[in-house]
Image (cartoon, rainbow, N blue to C red):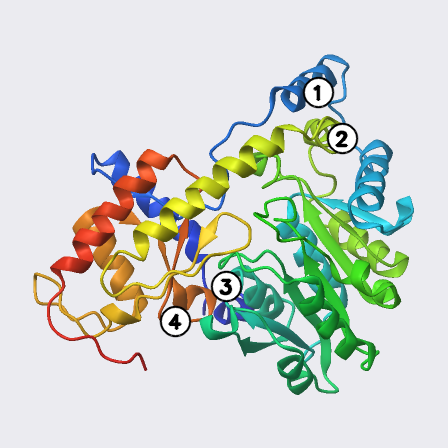
Amino acid sequence: MSILANRLSRIKPSATLAVTAKAKELKAAGKDIIGLGAGEPDFDTPDFIKNAAKAAMDAGQTKYTNVDGTPELKDAIIAKFKRDNGLEYSRDEINVGTGGKQVLYNAMMATLNAGDEVIIPAPYWVSYPDMVLLAEGEPVIVDCPQSANFKMTAEQLEAAITPKTKWVILNSPSNPTGAGYTHDDMKALTDVLLKHDHVWVMTDDMYEHLVYGDFKFCTPAQVEPKLKDRTITINGVSKSYSMTGWRIGYAGGPKELIKAMGKIQGQSTSNPSSISQAAAVEALNGDQSFMTSWIEAFKGRRDLVVGLLNDCEGIECPMPEGAFYVYPSCAGCIGKQTPNGKTIETDEDFVSYLLEDQGVACVHGAAFGLSPHFRISYATSEEALTNACKRIKAACEALQGEARAAA
């Protein structure tokens, strides 16, 4: 008899982490690999944030803190929500966790009973469905194809809601597509949610500041204040401040929910790192101007990658509004054969071919719930991106035969 819990059979390992690990393994073995799988900025954490961490250590701030965050960090988060989103919270409406992932997981564990449904637009971040499954809930996947700009419509949301619906998860700008909901898009969704008072809103705003051109970020409780009492607004310092390894995520939400999430955290990890919390205070309260150059760099990389990928035979790459991902279609490569005679049947076959033939590591679309696509992170240098896209183009040109419509 296995010692492992039955619930583990409901989930699979993170595809994005697996790709990153595989790329590192091949690099360590001496292979020439360009890794485009990692969802983290290549910029270093700004010095003023690192200096705050050093100062905290020198001041002896190396002990346990409150389970769900220091008062100083909660105050910085409260100020951020008011400044950036027009949302007002008190300390007992704020939770700080070890990364946004833990905050999301704690919210699921605190609220889902067996059979509760969670609406998840696809493509989705790989962990959403598995978190729901671990909490004994049921993911309800809503397909949002490229023709709909990878966004869920009000009609789709209305059709997906049942008496068992507990949550709808919204992520804008999106991982993996970079697609963003405009104010009008979001208002259409919140209008539907107003009619269903048993449905709560979980919004993942991790890429809030990474938007380009004329696109304006908005979050559900900001668009429709009447939903604030059943919305949890989740964010963190990982992406916008290049602090992925510091592991600080946070949320604002109703007191009862926040208290329950803290209860779970108290019996699992307890408090996030005291040093990381001190650094996050400085990140949120400090000078935000450094983001301007980062955003300009990401925009340049986005434009470069979209242009180069659209020059590849069999690939179609839409222009995203934010984050640092593109989610091109490889439908034009499905059904073709590789130089060694293997037929490309799926997007997973395609990305395996890119890795084995050209040393380019990216993530297949099936992992995000929508095929035939693949995700590329452009959070790396223009030189690496240019080289990678040249390799992808060579791989596409080497395919033989006719493409067929994806199943």
Count of labels shown? 4
Determine the residue positioned at 22% across, 38% down. Answer: 32
Label 3 close to label 2 by CB (< 8 Å): no
Query: Dividing the picture into quarters, in which one does residue 109 lie?
Result: bottom right
Determine the residue positioned at 72% across, 84% down. Answer: 164
Badge 1 local density, few (<14 within 10 Å), some, or many (20+)? many
Disc 4 or 1, which lies upstream in sequence?
1
Determine the residue positioned at 60% across, 24% down. Answer: 46
Instruction: Look at discs 3 and 1 and give the one toward the viewer.
Output: 1
Quarter that holds the N terminus: bottom left
What is the number of the mark on residue 4? 3
Badge 3 local density, few (<14 within 10 Å), some, or many (20+)? few
Disc 3 or 2, which lies upstream in sequence?
3
What is the number of the mark on residue 52? 1
When the figure is inspected, residue 9 is found, relative to residue 387, above or below; the finding is below
Determine whether, in the image, residue 373 is placed left or right of residue 147: left
Q: CA distance from mark 4 to mark 1?
A: 44 Å
Determine whether, in the image, residue 342 is placed left or right of residue 153: left
What is the number of the mark on residue 281? 2
Disc 3 or 4, which lies upstream in sequence?
3
